[in-house]
Amino acid sequence: MRRVLLIAHRVPVSGAFTLNDLAGGGGRMDEIARCVSTFFSLSNALRQDVELTILFVAQPPPKARRIEVVGNRLRYLNPDERSTAALLKNALVRSIPLDRDVESSPGIRVGPVDPGPSIRAFAQHAGTFWLSEDGHPYRGSPLLDGGFSAILSDPTDPTPDEVEELKSLGIPKLSLGPRSMRSSQCLDVLNHESDLRELERPRDPVR
């Protein structure tokens, strides 16, 4: 299984933004939508063995929101960022009157959340790592063998509190290179590397 936790710092948690201004008033929802599209989309299909959790931590409202996107249940995802942003916006809007999780569309679940415990819960997955330019090189790292569990931030760096939380959990850092890349590009690299490692994995002999 390939799992990612993406922390979105500026997207209005209420979904109160227009699809015509995803980068500005949408708090870089354009890049969040690209992350979803990039992580799940193949040329003519969707990846089934991937899960993406997005923590929307901007204020207001007082409660952050978590959207979980599950590949083997996902429907209605198209490769363009506008329609993907619409799916995520709809999930946020539907969650505001509720104090519980709800499936806003097949494969997309949303609900209120406390970010700290959510990060700690995600870190319980075996081999979880944190993507950062000052981490160890990803090439050759066993953390990408047989799937992965990665934590990364949107175009805004993690807050000091988030950094301290991740450090306190002892999560190792991996780097995809010396230059800062967009979050969606990072997910492309991770999927590509994992795909290559699957090809190189020894196969059971045909009986």
Image (cartoon, rainbow, N blue to C red):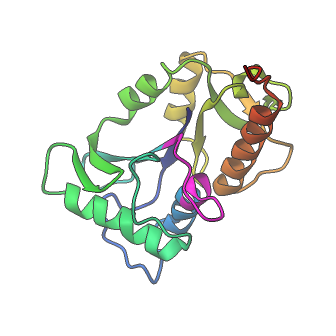
Tell which residue pokes out farthest to the front in this image.
207
Left/right of residue 148 with respect to residue 78 in the rendered view: right
Q: Nearer the viewer, residue 106 or 21?
A: 106
Prevalent SS, magenta region:
loop
Q: Nearer the viewer, residue 119 or 205?
A: 205
Q: Position of residue 88 (x, y in %)?
A: 38, 62
Residue 135's place in the image compared with 183, above or below, is: above
Q: Position of residue 112 (x, y in %)?
A: 25, 44
Left/right of residue 166 with respect to residue 57 in the rendered view: right
**Quick check: can you spot residue 23?**
no
Left/right of residue 16 with respect to residue 153 in the rendered view: left
Number of disc labels: 0
Residue in view at x 46 percent, y 68 percent: 84
Query: Magenta stretch?
Result: 37-51
Looking at the rendering, in which quadrant would you find the C terminus?
A: top right
**Quick check: can you spot residue 59?**
yes
Q: Position of residue 174 (x, y in %)?
A: 74, 30
